[in-house]
Image (cartoon, rainbow, N blue to C red):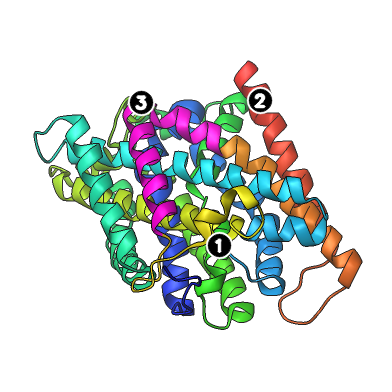
Amino acid sequence: MGEGLKRRIGPVVLTLYGIGIMVGAGIYVLTGAAAGAAGMWAPVAFLLAGVIAIPSALSFAELSGRIPEAAGDSAYIEHGLGLHWLAVLVGLVNVVVGTVAAAAVLRGGVGYLLALVDIPFVWGVVGLGVALTIVALIGVMESLSFAAILTLIEVTGLGMVIWAGANAAPVEAFHLPMPAPEWGGIALATIFAFFALIGFDDIVNMAEETRNPGRNLPLAVMASLVVTALLYALVSLAAVRAVPREVLAGSDRPLALVWEAGSGQPGYFLSAIAVAAALNGVLAQIVMASRVLYGLGKRSVWLTMFRRTNAQLGTPVLGTVLIAAATIAAALVLPVAVLAEGSTLALLVVFAIVNASLIGVKRKRGDEGGFTVPVWMPWLGVLSCLGTLAASVLGRLG
């Protein structure tokens, strides 16, 4: 067995990896859940999620340049807060969240797959899960190159959805005056939207396989977030314009409905693209979570078994297989909305801690050149994450 990862990833593939996680991690699946919660105000929820993510993304961008390690969050906490136990705990939370996110996207992708082929749900989940596990084991460049191709396909599909939504006759509720905003529903929809933006934080976990990480990691973090946020705002607007709220909320393939409303044609090919998006999202999360386990292998004596890699493939085999098996199991049991909401609430806490870690790093070491943000930016990140967490809980209780 080998003992190290190989630096093979450049900025373009890394950025496409980030976009692929975010596009694959929800927009094809969670548009309906967001519309069901916020109605016509769902696009506002996606915009709010993007605004909330910006301070944390900037903090991740600076930290990734300063501390380019796998299990990035854990490394940041170790350096910034000096709390070893918290660093390991947050790393394990990230592994669980990545697994849950992969399960949510896998379950949603199989929903689109069943519109194309008549197979049992269990076969779809297990078959796709096993196939993606094999791809993840072959090698990181092979995995990410495959993911980059899927990313280009799914972004093309989103462009077609935007066109269809603009071309469709608007639903009655879309006409002015707009209905009064449902703030509890908007807060809940923002949680779903934030889940769809998960991905910029995963980029940093590829640090030990990235060429020139001090430059390429911050670039990929910010580029992927900006591109994806713009796409999401347009897609969610197209969806609520073209399809009634209650129909979107009850559908397993909401964007296919938008295509059908705007083009008058069956959305089978869009369902195929959505399956590609799901494959991308699941693959990216499996790769990410296994790298977090790899990084934790040098922080905890109980996790050293995950520090080993295959000498020929350069991939962490044990972590990859474990994450993939847990993903398949969770996808078979839990519904998408429950998976998405739970993982997002956990990530908001993690992001708040990472922002606090940057505050600690700046106090200890000052600015070191490279990509830096003002000292108030991580403070804003802490407040935005905790504020969103509180609003979502109150919205759920309301």
Is the residue marked by circle 1 packed among few (<14), some (14-19), or many (20+) residues within 10 Å?
Answer: many
Q: Quadrant of the N terminus?
A: bottom left
Considering the whole magenta stretch, tell me its main secondary structure.
helix
Q: Which residue is mark 3?
A: 333
- Give percent across and percent down for residue 307: 53, 61
Q: Quadrant of the C terminus?
A: top right
Q: Earlier in the sequence, mark 2 or mark 1?
A: 1
Q: Residues under labels 2 and 1: Cα distance?
A: 29 Å
Q: Residue at x 23, y 39 (%)?
A: 126
- Give percent across and percent down for residue 59: 71, 61
SS class, disc 2: helix
Residue 339 position (above or below residue 303): above
The mark found on residue 205 in the picture is 1
Q: Earlier in the sequence, mark 3 or mark 1?
A: 1
Q: Is residue 22 magenta?
A: no
Q: Earlier in the sequence, mark 3 or mark 2?
A: 3
- Give percent across and percent down for residue 313: 34, 71
The mark found on residue 393 in the picture is 2
Is the residue marked by circle 3 packed among few (<14), some (14-19), or many (20+) residues within 10 Å?
Answer: few
Q: Residue at x 13, y 42 (%)?
A: 266
Is the residue marked by circle 2 packed among few (<14), some (14-19), or many (20+) residues within 10 Å?
Answer: some
Q: Residue at x 62, y 37 (%)?
A: 346
The disc labelled 2 sits on which kind of residue?
Val
Q: Residues under labels 3 and 1: Cα distance?
A: 28 Å
SS class, disc 1: helix
Range of the magenta residues?
317-343
SS class, disc 3: helix
